[in-house]
Image (spheres, rainbow, N blue to C red):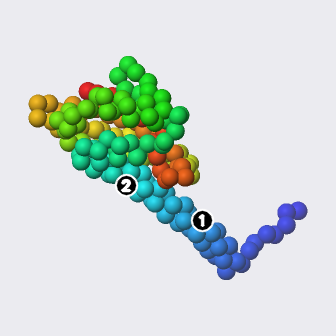
Amino acid sequence: MKPNLRLPAAVILLIAGLASALGQSSAQPKSRTSERAKAAIQAVLDAQRDAWNRGDIEGYMDGYARSAKTEFVGGDSISRGWQTVLDRYKKKYDTREKMGTLTFSEIEITLLGKDAALVLGRWRLKRADDEPHGTFTLLFRKTKSGWRIVHDHSSSA
């Protein structure tokens, strides 16, 4: 013989309401946290663009983690260490004309956890004689200094 486990409709509605409320209250802070993280990462990219367009490579490099483990992959080379990446930029873009005007587009930010994010996008330099452009994949980490790039893989079209 099966036991009769019928619950009154009011109890079922109460349980459903509690489950829904619990689900919403735990999802909202997570969503707000995600949005704040994405906004902070976008702010780093905006600050990098602005620094570059002022001719400030050191300011641009503020978007990278100041670590010996920071990596830049481009062309057929891998640069390791914040200082090495800075030196690479200074050598390749040693005049304001070579730097041109930088824009980013089609930015996609995917949070991988509370302290890591993957960013995909396109970059373009507008210069007097050409417009080099390409794509990038960035790995951001949340550090003591805020969100910073720890790995940059950029390619040219």
| Kind of residue indicated by mark 1 | Ser
| Kind of residue indicated by mark 2 | Ala
**Label 1's element?**
helix
Q: Is residue 97 visible?
A: yes
Q: Quadrant of the C terminus?
A: top left
Neighbor class of circle 2 (other Cα within 10 Å; few <14, some 14-19, many 20+) is some
Neighbor class of circle 1 (other Cα within 10 Å; few <14, some 14-19, many 20+) is few
Say which label, 1 or 2, has the lower sequence index: 1
Return the residue at label 2: 43
Task: Give the CA separation, mark 1 to mark 2.
Answer: 26 Å
The residue at the point 46 percent across, 46 percent down is 148
Q: In this view, does 19 lie to the left or right of 79?
A: right
Query: 126 or 34, which is in the foreground?
Result: 126
Return the residue at label 1: 26
Residue 13's place in the image compared with 73, above or below, is: below
Query: 86 or 28, which is in the foreground?
Result: 86
Q: For residue 131, which quarter of the picture?
A: top left
Q: Is residue 109 left or right of residue 11?
A: left
